[in-house]
Amino acid sequence: MKQLLSTWILILTSLSVQAEPVPAYYPKFFPNSGVVSEINIGAGTMVVQDKRVFFGNDLRVHTTRTRSASMLNIQPGTRIGYKYTPDAQGRPMVFEIWVLPPRQPALPLP
């Protein structure tokens, strides 16, 4: 009986920890997502989940507070969803980023 009660408490506690809502301008799924571990705004590079990606001046950054933010909103440890396309040299060039709330689960493609 004690074990059953403990199991129910664990389930109810888990259900109470929900993802934070995101604005309507956030997509339902992100082709790529992860935690930024390194960023160099001057060089236009960052590392997300051990993958080095590049970005230029045409990058669009979105946060839960505004559709139009800057790379200054992104620091090591920030969770992001992002889209990229290969550039002329075949490097992954990020063109759009969404800053994810800390408790928002990563949303991969369906």
Image (tube, grey):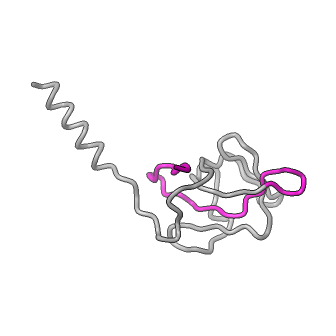
Rendered location of residue 97, percent (x, y) = 64, 61
- In the picture provided, is 55 more to the left or to the right than 4? right
In which quadrant is the N terminus drawn?
A: top left
- In the picture provided, is 107 more to the left or to the right than 58? left
Q: Quadrant of residue 62?
A: bottom right
Query: What residue span does the magenta drawing correspond to?
Result: 86-110
Q: Is residue 91 magenta?
A: yes
Image point (72%, 57%), residue name: 84
Which is more toward the observer, 32 or 62? 32
Image point (83%, 50%), residue name: 91
Q: Is residue 77 magenta?
A: no
Rendered location of residue 34, percent (x, y) = 60, 47
- In the picture provided, is 24 more to the left or to the right than 73? left
- In the picture provided, is 82 more to the left or to the right than 22? right
Image point (57%, 60%), residue name: 99
Image point (59%, 62%), residue name: 98
Majority secondary structure of the magenta segment? loop
Residue at the farthest front position: 110
Which is more toward the observer, 53 or 44? 53
Rendered location of residue 81, percent (x, y) = 59, 55
Does residue 86 sit above or below 71 in this rendering? above
Residue at the farthest right position: 89
Rendered location of residue 57, percent (x, y) = 79, 69
Does residue 102 sit above or below 3 in this rendering? below
Residue at the farthest left position: 1
